[in-house]
Image (cartoon, rainbow, N blue to C red):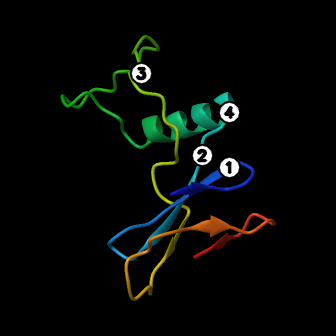
Amino acid sequence: MNFSKDGKYLAAAGQDKIVRVWQVLSSKDDRTTHEQGEDAAGTTDGEGEDPYADGHGVRLNAPVFMTEPIQQYHGHTGDVLDLSWSKAGHQGV
């Protein structure tokens, strides 16, 4: 695992031979937008009800990364043992 120089992304890889790049939710605005998207996608309490519908639900987590990676790199023939980012912010494997 390795964070980009600007701290906006995390690249992670391992034995599955796939490099995944995750966007960091680095501001309150990023988190709010992400949580609104989750809520719109149908976050429920298991009973089919939206716990935030009345505006009084309590969120018990604070997301740090987007739910899905923004990029995946396939095609490595062996385990990915190390990752690094270029000075310009692009990852190198």
Q: Earlier in the sequence, mark 2 or mark 1?
A: 1
- Residue 25 point in image, percent of width and height: 60, 40
Q: Earlier in the sequence, mark 1 or mark 4?
A: 1
Local packing at callout 3 (Cα closer than 10 Å; few below 14, some 14-19, many 20+) is: few
Q: Is residue 43 above or below residue 50?
A: below
Secondary structure type for disc 3:
loop
Secondary structure type for disc 4:
loop
Q: Nearer the viewer, mark 1 or mark 3?
A: 1
Q: Are marks 1 and 3 in contact (CB under 8 Å)?
A: no
Q: Earlier in the sequence, mark 4 or mark 3?
A: 4
Q: Seen from this angle, which residue lies furthest left?
A: 47
Label 3 to label 2, Cα distance in Å? 19 Å
Q: Residue at x 23, y 31 (%)?
A: 48
Q: Is residue 70 left or right of residue 6?
A: left
Q: According to the image, label 2 marks what residue?
A: 24
- Residue 63 point in image, percent of width and height: 49, 35
Q: Are marks 4 and 3 in contact (CB under 8 Å)?
A: no
- Residue 55 point in image, percent of width and height: 47, 14
Q: Residue at x 38, y 77 (%)?
A: 79
Q: Earlier in the sequence, mark 3 or mark 2?
A: 2
Q: Residue 8, labelled with which disc?
A: 1
